[in-house]
Image: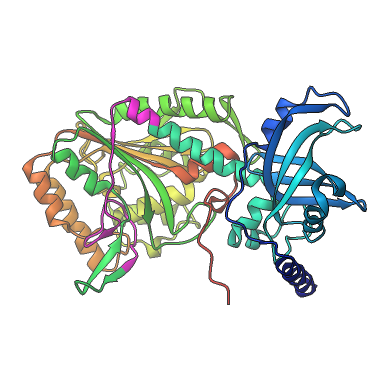
Amino acid sequence: MEEDLIKQRLKKLEELKKSGINPYPYSFDKKDDSSNLLEEFKILKSDEKAKRKVSIAGRIIALRDMGKASFGHIQDAKGKIQFYIKEEEVGEKGYKILKLSDIGDVIGIKGYVFKTKTGEVTVRSESYELLSKGIRPLPEKWHGLKDVEIRYRKRYLDLIMNRDVKKVFETRAKIIDIIRNYLKKNEFIEVEIPTLQSIYGGASAQPFKTHLNALNIDLFLSISPELYLKRLIVGGFERVFTICKNFRNEGIDRQHNPEFTMLEFYYAYQNYEKLISMTEELFSILVKDICVNKKVEYQGKTIDFTTPFKRITFRDLVLKESGIDIDKAKDFKSLKEAIKNKNLKNVQVNNCRHYGDLLDELYKRVCRPNIIQPTLLTHYPVEMIALAKRNEKDPRKINTFQLVIDGAEIVKAYDELNDPIDQKERLIEQQRLLQEGAEGAMPLDEDFIYALEVGMAPTAGYGLGIDRLTMLLTNSSSIRDVIVFPFMKPEK
């Protein structure tokens, strides 16, 4: 069926060319948008003609042939609007182009606006141009492209057919603008970090590996900008941020994509408490500008962004949800026994190689899914984050917090470890775990240690997942809904 439609369109294409009509011209003087015209001329009376001339362009989404006159609708970046074209007004050549046009073609129209007897604002054509002849027909149903596989793989069709999808990405852009403006108002400088790195680090994740032919060396795609941003703090910057892509060679699910977008910023002479207040301030601005109301509907739940957010320590959360006191189960053996004694079947202890692994598995399987409202989870055990500073009162904990909403980690922040001796010891332990097969462990970065030995000011660091935040504020169920081109398994 589709092949027959393509053949028909190819015949029309040839006929256009034989008639001396370029089906792919170079430009069109588009001056007006559909939504602006609908707003500007909504006060027109039926059959009333506007004075000024207009020029619109877009994709044909409906076409009704009435002999020597036709009605249709075109869709542009702002919406859709009706057009009316009559042979005696556009001439025989112009109307022939219309006759050879199909739904999905991109056209340009110049004329004036009037309102039909039914009250619809319409552009009456004085000239009609074909700007791009579509060879392949659009999906049949204009009420929405439903096949998820096609929607993600052929995002251009998704954007044409499902107009709400475009709003999601417009909102995403607005979220990034708000964050960027907030940080710049607070005197942060935006910087860039290398994507190709000889030594990866800054997160517990397995990297992607590549090869640089010019130097015949292996490289890694960045899993985090953290270690480079800290080098800038050492170099004398006091407030830096980046909005960048991270690449992690891990699982794919509704909250994970192999490449994703992060905000990270580093604030010298401040601690995690300052970043908590900034988080509450930033989220109040975001929710007000994006959602208007502090109570946001997300996947059938009402998320209340009223500040201050609830706080709970990591130890208290684990005790509440599992009945295990990690202050008593202080090592790998005792924690593993406690998990088995509680008969926590969802916790896969056999896959865990060290104490931090067990803690993370227990937290992710038993605790995190039960957090629905915005919650600041503080003071993780030191084994869970190798780059964070120990707590002053309890050195087995670190000065850190995560903002968790509906079971998803949105923000992670902590006081940065600037003691080069402690940091080297922890990274040596990470290196040992990596050599023993812990794929998420970090290698030892000697140059980073060197930088810390030069001296880094007390600093608080902050990471925010742009994709997951966009999911929340656009009521999107999957990370693939908020990434324009999510990773897809190649078609055969």
Q: Residue at x 12, y 54 (%)?
A: 447
Return the residue found at the far left: 454
Q: In terms of depth relative to the viewer, which is nearer, 376 or 33?
A: 33
What is the x, y in percent for residue 345?
A: 50, 57
**Quick one: quadrant of the N terminus?**
bottom right
Q: Is residue 306 shown left or right of residue 122?
A: left
**Image quarter for residue 266?**
top left
Q: In terms of depth relative to the viewer, which is nearer, 277 or 482?
A: 482
What is the x, y in percent for residue 299?
A: 63, 41
Q: Residue at x 23, y 44 (%)?
A: 229
Q: What residue range appears in magenta?
A: 181-209
- Is residue 256 part of the magenta span, yes or no? no
- In the figure, 54 relative to 261: above or below? above
- In the figure, 415 relative to 467: above or below? above
> Can I make out residue 2 in this image?
yes
**Quick one: quadrant of the C terminus?**
bottom right
> Can I make out residue 424 in this image?
no
Q: Residue at x 29, y 49 (%)?
A: 225
Return the residue found at the far bottom: 492
Q: In terms of depth relative to the viewer, which is nearer, 396 or 96?
A: 96
- Is residue 203 part of the magenta span, yes or no? yes
Q: Is residue 149 shown left or right of residue 206?
A: right
What is the x, y in percent for residue 426?
A: 18, 52
Question: How are the colours assigned in the image?
Answer: rainbow
SS majority, magenta: loop
What is the x, y in percent for residue 83?
A: 79, 42
Number of residue marks: 0
Q: In terms of depth relative to the viewer, which is nearer, 172 or 334?
A: 172
Q: Residue at x 53, y 51 (%)?
A: 479
**Image quarter for residue 455?**
top left
